[in-house]
Image (cartoon, rainbow, N blue to C red):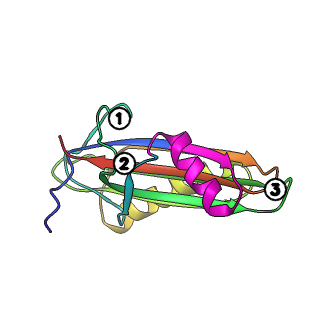
Amino acid sequence: MVIETPTHFYLCAGTSEGYTELNAFDGALLDAGIGNTNLVKMSSILPPSCIQVEPLKIPDDIPYGSLLPVAYSAKGSDMPGAIISASVAVAIPVDAKKPGLIMEYSSPGRKDIAERIVREMAQHGMKQRGETVKEIISIAIEIEVTRIGAAFAAVVLWKF
């Protein structure tokens, strides 16, 4: 099977409580707007010249059950009162012919800390590649667990 290189991307995030940690994760996918698809976890490279778009809608833009390429972070917990967070960042290079970099980070704690860390990870990853960063785009989310909770953040890649 050959998968075409994505041309567009967007960021999304969601949280949920659930009967089990997997149910909470599933609910977080629904909250993020990408439930009812089959996630294909990608490593962390944004194709050159990939364009950011507004989040796509399922099933209007992306059919139910689609294989959906995503780079994501997720955190689950069954500790009531715990705060958990998930975040992703996209580093876009100055040279549009070069690939960008996606970083993922999840942890116990507040989303502002997770977002700061994931942005620093993206900056360091681009430096390691010898690339100059044009911009870093990020998203983070947190939840205070009631019973069993999940936090999820993703970069969705798609080809039009």
Residue nearest the viewer, comparing 122 with 63: 63
**Lower sequence index among marks 3 and 1:** 1
Please state the extent of the stretch shown in magenta in the rendering. Answer: 13-34
* Residue 156 covered by magenta stretch: no
For marks 3 and 1, give the CA distance.
Answer: 31 Å
Residue nearest the viewer, comparing 69 with 38: 38
Residue 61: quarter of image: top left
Task: Please give the residue where the numbered disc 3 appears in the rendered image.
Answer: 82
> Element under label 2?
strand
For marks 1 and 2, give the CA distance.
Answer: 9 Å
**Lower sequence index among marks 1 and 2:** 1
> Element under label 1?
loop
Q: Position of residue 106 (x, y in %)?
A: 61, 60
Q: Which mark is residue 156?
A: 2
* Residue 21 covered by magenta stretch: yes
**Residue at 67% of width from left, 62% of height from top?**
21
Q: Are marks 1 and 2 in contact (CB under 8 Å)?
A: yes
Task: Please give the residue where the numbered disc 1 appears in the rendered image.
Answer: 56
Residue 150: quarter of image: bottom right
